[in-house]
Image (cartoon, rainbow, N blue to C red):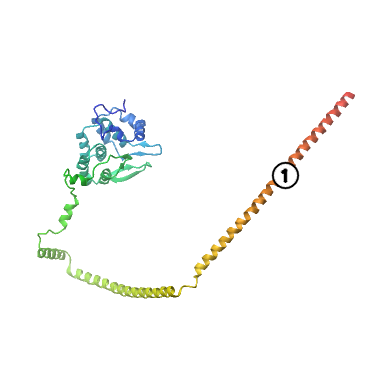
Amino acid sequence: MANRTVKEAKNVHGTNPQYLIEKIIRSRIYDSKYWKEQCFALTAELLVDKAMELRFVGGVYGGNIKPTQFLCLTLKMLQIQPEKDIVVEFIKNEEFKYVRALGAFYLRLTGVALDCYKYLEPLYIDNRKLRRQNRAGQFEIVYMDEYIDELLRNDRVCDIILPRIQKRTILEENNEIEPKVSVLDEDLDDELPSEDEKPDDREANRTNENSTSSVRRPRRARSKSKSRSRERDRRPAQSNNTRSRDYYDELEEFERQRNRTRNRDTQHGDRRQPAARQDRDRERQDRDRDQRQDRDRKPQIRDRERQDRDRMRERERYGERERRERDNGSRHDQRERDTRNERDRRRH
């Protein structure tokens, strides 16, 4: 009874809400200690306190597939099916980041595409760190915006297969949602010059900026540093240009010579075989000869092994025969001794 969905719950994506989690993981959650002790008879009000105690997110871990507390509370929310306002308050909670992560994960499992984009995309500005437990049981750092992006793009998060949702482009074409506006666009608009601003105004602004920067620094030190830096820049540039020209001239000459040799070989034919190719052919011939010799030796080796086995069998048979004869002789001697002793006893 404790593992059944409440009677007032509605079907989600055409099925029981608890069935959104796979059966194997669901049975592991039912058998876990945290589910039996902490999740028993939880209501929507008490679930908030348990969510505030979370310290990491994750799915299952270990060789025997142990569920995390985050996954247990997710299944409990699917079981009691809290109202949409409570889930939205979970997502809008800025003080406890793991409460927000739990609400976002539940909304991605049960919500429609429009609600997912509406409530989850504003969380891209949240750059707080989250601890996530991987399949090996180790903790890794993930950011909130990265976690939200995985919920909207990936098919599996925290070892749970997420239901499919419509792409944002389709919703924009149907005028169901407004086009996405990035927060970075405002910063780019501030940096880029406006179209109404004239070129003369831009040059005046640049001269003003240069004049203000020149006031801050002494003129002599700046002129000396500039002249020195220019001299340093000129010297290596000239040397690099001369070197590069010589290098490219030599490279072109080398290409010409190589093309000449190729044309000459194609016209007259290359009758001489390179030494490397000859060595390769010799090695291949030696290898084939060794293989042939090994193939010829195999029947001889088999015959020798067979003869050795026959000899060993003969020796075993001969040893067994001698052992039997020895045993028979010892028994005959014992009988003679017994009969001799019996005669002596009778005689006395």
The answer to which of 91 and 269 lies nearer the viewer is 269
The residue at 22%/41% (across/down) is 113
Residue annotated with mark 1? 314
Residue 233: image location, x then y, percent: 26, 71
Taking the image as shown, residue 317 lies to the left or right of residue 343, namely left
| Label 1 environment density (alpha carbons within 10 Å; few <14, some 14–19, many ≥20) | few
Quarter residue 54 falls in = top left
Q: Is residue 262 visible to the viewer in this orientation of the structure?
A: yes
Residue type at numbered disc 1: Glu
Q: Is residue 348 visible to the viewer in this orientation of the structure?
A: no
- Please give the count of numbered marks on the rendered protein: 1
Quarter residue 260 falls in = bottom left
Residue 19: image location, x then y, percent: 31, 33
Whether 114 is drawn above or below 214: the answer is above
Q: Quadrant of the C terminus?
A: top right
Residue 284: image location, x then y, percent: 54, 62
The residue at 70%/45% (across/down) is 312
